Image (cartoon, rainbow, N blue to C red):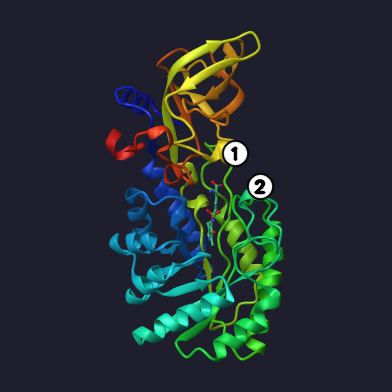
Amino acid sequence: MFSDKDIAHFSKLETPFYYYDLNLLQSTLNACNKAASAYKFHVHYAMKANFNPIVLKKIEKVGFGADCVSGNEVKKALELGFAKEKVVFAGVGKSDKEINDALDNDIFCFNVESVQELSVINELAEKKGKIAKIAIRINPNVDAHTHANITTGLDENKFGVNSWDMPACADVLNISPNLQFIGIHFHIGSQITNLDVYKNLCVRVNEFATWFEDHGFKVTVLNVGGGLGIDYHNPNQQIPDFESYFKIFADFLDVKSYQEVHFELGRALVGQSASLISRVLYVKNGKKKNFIILDAGMTELMRPALYQAYHQIENISKSKIVNQKSEITKYDVVGPICESTDCFGKEVPLAETFRNDLIAIRSAGAYGEVMASHYNLRENVQTVSSEDVG
Ligand code: LLP
């Protein structure tokens, strides 16, 4: 929801830009923190969802750690003040340089995704005389019931170590003095809205934890990843139900007194806090279709083009009349990029729209700005926050 003041401010600015509602971000972080703390659960924010410094600083202040998937994410997390004891490094293809830098920075843990990676980290740690803490990312073959492109925990996915490779992991761990096994890690996919999926995950986590303990490895960290979805159809129903989410893990995980439970939430923390604000360049009324052509495109928000993702589209210049059914026209809302997939929504019902109207594409805080590209030699997308509006 935008106030008249927000809209008056936006109308003076160049578009497109991402608008961050920092009050909503703070309330979301507080709600998550409260719900997690009730069970003494630890949250590492999945930085890949959004690494804008204004977002990261707020997250660091709440006390969450950082879940990083590249050497540059590790570097940025440390630069912005995340304590090294709260930085984890995951990723299926960590380079030697990235591993070496993370070792130099004494991060909390590597989430290791293959048997070979275990040997490589051991070798590199040995050269530095360091002990690397590691958690094994296990592919639990649990279906997340989400879009195929953002499913990660099935046997056919590239992520993690499969169950049949556990004995090989144990063998390497037993001959690797520079590795300290601390636990197991899972992440089955993103934008998960059916919470029952997590019950299935808990069953698998319990099985694997038992397997490692039975084979002589003390499991002190159970990292269950992230994936909690947001309601893209209701951007104003803004804070995800963190309480129900954490309760599932409290109810279904077997947690021993010496074990910590870690989460890596991304989208749920930042998704609803931003909108992409754009201006209408042209309106084309055709016989079969009406088109709104925006000054933002898939280069600024790639999700609709990449995953056919739904984002609510609102004409905020016309917010006062948008509910009058008689005024509604259906438009295909597209961007200026030379690709047919550069489309934010088809047959979108909107108030009659004109050149220079402001359009908000909602729920764009996660995997929006960070996935922007320079295709067609587009400019960097700008950022505006609620603090700028005052
Ligand atoms: N942990 C790991 C190991 C991950 O791979 C991911 C996301 C997360 C945590 C955080 O997941 P979240 O809580 O945000 O669902 N670009 C796609 C989403 C890709 C997710 C990649 N991994 C999208 O726009 O929907």
The residue at 55%/17% (across/down) is 291
- Snapshot quadrant of residue 68: bottom left
Q: Quadrant of the C terminus?
A: top left
Establish whether ligand 1 lies closer than 8 Å to the Cβ of label 2: yes
Residue at the disc numbered 1: 309
Does ligand 1 reach within 8 Å of label 1's beta carbon? yes
| Left or right: 214 in relation to 33 | right
Dot 2 amino acid type: His
Give the CA separation, mark 2 to mark 1.
Answer: 9 Å
Identify the mark nearer the N-term, 2 or 1: 2
Q: Quadrant of ligand 1?
A: bottom right
Going 46% across and 15% down the picture, which residue do you hit? Answer: 282
Q: Are marks 2 and 1 in contact (CB under 8 Å)?
A: yes
Q: Helix or strand or loop: what does disc 2 sit on?
A: loop
Q: Is residue 82 left or right of residue 338?
A: left
**Residue 81 spot, x, y in % from top left:** 30, 63
Amino acid tagged 1: Ala
Residue 139 horizontal/vertical position (percent): 65, 68
Residue 220, position as x, y percentages in the image:
53, 81
Secondary structure at numbered mark 1: loop
Indicate whether 125 appears above or below 187.
below
Residue nearest the viewer, comparing 126 with 186: 126
Q: Is residue 203 visible?
A: yes
Q: Residues within 10 Å of mark 2 (few under 14, many from 20)?
A: some
Q: Which residue is mark 2?
A: 147
